[in-house]
Every structure is written in C-alpha cells, then in structure tokens.
Image: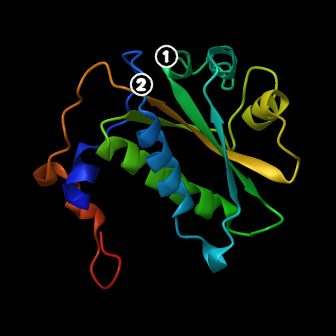
C-alpha cells in the first residue's frame, strides 16, 4: 500500500474491540515515532507507553468531559517534549505523533490523537493532570496522547475527489 493510500484510509478511531495489539506492531508504531524528522535532529520527544488498565482509566479524566476512548484503548502513547532542548519541540512532537498515527493505521490498529497541550481537565490543565499520574519532569511539556486499540468497526476511507482543493493556492494567495 502506498503512503497516499494509507493516508486516505487513516481515520480517528475511538471505539476498540478489546483485542490485544500485537507486540511487533506496537514496536513498529514506536519506531515510526523515533524515526520522525526533528529540527537540527534534536529529537526532543519522549514517549511514555501506558498499558495498565487502571492508568488508562485514570487518564481518561485528563480533559474536561473525559476522554472515553482511553477507557477502551489497549494502549496509549503519551508524547512529551523537552522545551529546554528544542524551541520547536511542539512541531517535532507533532511530527512524531503523525508518524505513529499513520503507522498504526497501516498496521490495522485504530488510533486517535488526544490533544493535551493547551487543554484542561476539570480543575487543572491536562498537562498537570497527566504529569501527576506519570511523573515526568517540569521541563517536559505534554503535546498529546495517542490512543491505540484494534478497531471494533472499519471506517470508510476518505475519497480523493472530495478533498477541499480550494485550500490550495498557486504562487500567491487568492480568494
């Protein structure tokens, strides 16, 4: 399958079957994150892999209103970045998240990006909530959480002829 086809088929999956993620597949998802491009090759990210059901259930409270898919996920990858290591840590962590998202999809694993940065739990920031539970240092900032699980249903692929081509400007911005 070529990359455009993987992108076409990638959907945010929020409902999981409960089936275990093959260990080899999880390793490939993490390797895809580690292979991500980063400014000056600094790789300011760290990935915290969470598999314990109690911790996943607890993390579901990281955003106001809750994040239900964490209660169903078989695994989550928390992506944090060292803001003292790289001024573009946000972009670098986002590239790593996107690579893992695409790799998961290519392997038949459902995934969903749970935005952490600039979000709030009920009484604190999402970052504070997650840091209290996972213990990462203050210089590391939360970018996002990638939920992973085997999908309970197949979502339809995006159609190339339905893409908003008007978003593309050639040479100069034009309305």
- Indicate the position of residue 6 as horizontal and vertical percent values: 25, 51
Q: Position of residue 51 (x, y in %)?
A: 60, 26
Q: Residues within 10 Å of mark 1 (few under 14, many from 20)?
A: many
Position of residue 67 relative to residue 49, above or below, is above
Relative to 50, does residue 143 appear above or below in the rendering? below
The residue drawn where x is 80% and y is 51% is: 140
Residue at 66 percent of width and 66 percent of height: 43
Residue 132 in which image quadrant: top right
Q: Regarding mark 1 in the picture, which secondary structure is present there?
A: helix
Decide if residue 110 is on the left or right side of residue 93. Answer: left
Looking at the picture, tell me which residue is in the foreground, 65 or 155.
155
Q: Quadrant of the N terminus?
A: bottom left
Q: Nearer the viewer, mark 1 or mark 2?
A: 1
Q: CA distance from mark 1 to mark 2?
A: 8 Å
Question: Residue 135, position in %: x, y?
Answer: 84, 36
How far from the left and from the top, in percent, is residue 116? Answer: 65, 39
In the depicted structure, whether residue 171 falls above or below residue 112: below
- Res. 72 mark: 1
For this view, does 80 lie left or right of residue 174? right
Give the position of the C terminus as an image quadrant. bottom left
Residue at (88% x, 47% y) in the render: 138
| Residue at 84% across, 65% down | 84
Query: Which residue occupies the extreme front position in the image?
Result: 24
- Disc 1 vs disc 2: Cβ atoms closer than 8 Å? yes
Badge 2 is on which residue? Answer: 14
User: What mark, if any, has residue 159 been given in the picture?
Assistant: none
């Amino acid at each position: 399958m070529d990359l455009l086809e993987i992108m076409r088929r990638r959907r945010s999956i929020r409902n999981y079957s409960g089936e275990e993620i093959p260990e080899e597949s999880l390793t490939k998802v993490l390797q895809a994150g580690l292979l991500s491009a980063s400014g000056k090759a600094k790789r300011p990210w760290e990935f915290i892999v969470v598999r314990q059901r109690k911790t996943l259930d607890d993390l579901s409270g990281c955003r106001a209103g809750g994040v239900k898919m964490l209660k169903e996920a078989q695994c989550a990858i928390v992506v944090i970045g060292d803001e003292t290591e790289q001024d573009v840590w946000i972009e670098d962590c986002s590239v790593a998240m996107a690579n893992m998202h695409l790799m998961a999809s290519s392997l038949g694993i459902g995934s969903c990006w749970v935005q952490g940065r600039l979000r709030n739990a009920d009484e604190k920031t999402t970052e504070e909530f997650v840091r209290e539970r996972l213990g990462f240092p203050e210089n590391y900032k939360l970018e996002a959480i990638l939920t992973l699980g085997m999908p309970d249903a197949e979502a339809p692929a995006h159609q190339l002829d339905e893409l908003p081509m008007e978003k593309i400007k050639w040479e100069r911005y034009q309305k």
